[in-house]
Image (spheres, rainbow, N blue to C red):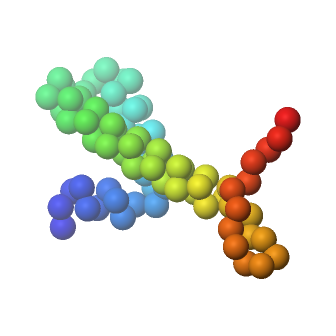
Amino acid sequence: MEKKEREKELSFEESIKKLESIVKELESGEVPLDDAIDKFNEACKLAKICDQKLKNATNSINKIINEDGSLTEFKVEE
């Protein structure tokens, strides 16, 4: 299985944990430059996956089911 496919299969929580782990490694300053570049690229991919999952969740949550069963966008009026 390709690395990219495995990342897509991770849950949001797993992706965040992996992203946090990579950030801690990079912040330590003890990662060789080539490895740091690879880890940075992996972190960017994970961040993109997490962002998309959040957007999908937000879109799903922001819908209201009407009495007739139709969906309406939820909007907060100020």
Above or below, 54 relative to 26: below
Residue 78 shows up from this direction: yes
Q: Is residue 13 visible?
A: no
Q: Position of residue 16 (x, y in %)?
A: 47, 47
Q: Quadrant of the N terminus?
A: bottom left
Relative to 64, residue 21 above or below: above
Furthest-right residue in this view? 78
The residue at the point 52 percent across, 56 percent down is: 56
The structure residue drawn at horizontal position 82% and vertical position 76%, both measured from the top left corner, is 67
User: Which residue of the protein is positioned furthest toward the left in this rendering?
Assistant: 34
Q: Is residue 30 left or right of residue 69?
A: left
Q: Is residue 21 left or right of residue 60?
A: left
Residue 38 location (% of width, % of height): 20, 36
Q: Is residue 25 left or right of residue 78?
A: left
In this view, 44 is above or below 46: above
Name the foreground residue: 2 vs 49: 49
| Front position in the image: 41 or 68 | 68
* Residue at the far top in the pictured view: 29
Residue 71 spot, x, y in % from top left? 68, 68
Quadrant in the picture for the C terminus: top right
Q: How many marks?
A: 0
Q: Nearer the viewer, residue 72 or 2?
A: 72
Q: Residue at x 14, y 28 (%)?
A: 34
- Residue 48 pos. (x, y %): 38, 43
